[in-house]
Image (tube, rainbow, N blue to C red):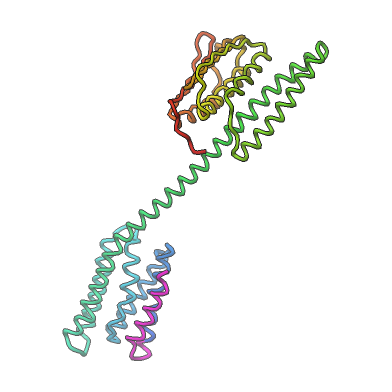
Amino acid sequence: MFLPLMVAGGVLLVALGARTWWHVLVLGVGAAVAAVAFERWAAGGLLPVAAPLLALAAATWVVGGVVLHSGHAFYALSVAGPLAVPQLPRHRGAAAVVLIAVVGVVGAVAVATAPGAFIGDLITFLLVPTGITAVITGLMFPNKRFYDVVADLERARGQEAELAVARERVRFASDLHDIQGHTLHVVKLKVALAEKLLRADVDRAEQELREVRALVADTITQTKELAHAQRRLNLSAELENAKNLFEAAGITVAVTRGTEPDPRAGELLGQVLRETTTNVLRHAEATRVEVTLSATGITITNDGAPRTPLPPLRGLSTLRDRLAADGGTLSAALRDGRFTTAATLPTGPRRRPR
């Protein structure tokens, strides 16, 4: 945005300060150096070309000030130097002192060799160039810190966006696991049961296969809803589904229901119930399951848990993180062959972003 102003300033400087073609050439090179330095600084790529630009800027000041006696020739060095010095990885303070000293020394030599009045030349070649360079250099240091803070904020914002995407991917994968993993395991059980009943009880076998077809169709619907961010679990439906699955597997179910939780809590507790149901059917040889439901929590206890350590239950670990985000807790304990999963939520859990 400021580059056209820099170019216009350089052209104006050449127009005001040039008295011969040599002046046009030297001041034109200085204006070009200043414009290139500013463009590279704005693009964040000044350091790789800083050395040749500073050498050209210093040369234009030496030739323009000492040889051509042009007070405008310090322009390039007063622009390129303050832009480059704060970008250095180290020794920035020393570099700033050297820059101001170079401008001052060349200006002093120009004063000593100038044919004009001493006071006028002192102001034109020494005080003004040195003062302007010092002021601009001093201003560029806090400017550099400001832009560093802005860059850090941009990086942090980018990292936060990446984390949000990663969290959403994990959530989506977890939900997909809830749907597909649960369904596939239940389909496996029902197909095995239908296979056993195929000769002994054809009607019951056909019923099991119809339930498998309905379950697959429901899973397809849930997967589509998940893909369109429309999936919501219904705790009552999940409770009835779990009861039917346990009974189909020959497991006695006892359900104790208290006050119904609100929809948000019901969705989270329904996820816990679904995951626990899958774990019981997959890992335990249960004969009885007890489910206790309240407005703020759910407890599922089953017998037939293996005496050996259970394999890692990754689904419960993911759900524990979800409940923690809503201020809730999830615990799992194995004792005397009984495995208990308990989830609690505070009254009116805060809504997580989905």
Residue 8 included in the magenta stretch of the image: yes
Establish if 231 lies above or below 193.
below
Q: Residue at left 32%, top 75%?
A: 58
Q: Can you see residue 291? A: yes
- The image shows residue 346, relative to residue 352, as above or below, that is above
Measured as percent of width and height from the top left, residue 236 is found at 59, 22
Where on the picture, by quarter, is residue 147? bottom left
Locate residue 75: give its quadrant: bottom left
Residue 305 visible in image: no
Give the percent coordinates (x, y) of residue 186: 68, 22
289 is higher (above) or lower (below) than 230: above
Q: Is residue 282 left or right of residue 344?
A: right
Q: Report the label total.
A: 0
From the viewer's side, name the closer residue of 246 and 39. Answer: 246
Q: Which residues are magenta?
A: 1-23
Nearer to me, 159 or 76? 159
Q: Residue at x 29, y 59 (%)?
A: 142
Q: Position of residue 56 (x, y in %)?
A: 37, 76
Q: Position of residue 252 (x, y in %)?
A: 62, 10
In which quadrant of the rendered image does the N terminus lie?
Answer: bottom left
Q: Is residue 220 left or right of residue 95?
A: right
| Magenta stretch contains residue 261 | no
Question: Residue, x 23% and y 71% (percent of image)?
Answer: 101
Looking at the image, residue 270 lies above or below residue 147: above
| Nearest the eye: 277 or 282 | 277
Q: Main secondary structure of the magenta part?
A: helix
Residue furthest to the front: 259
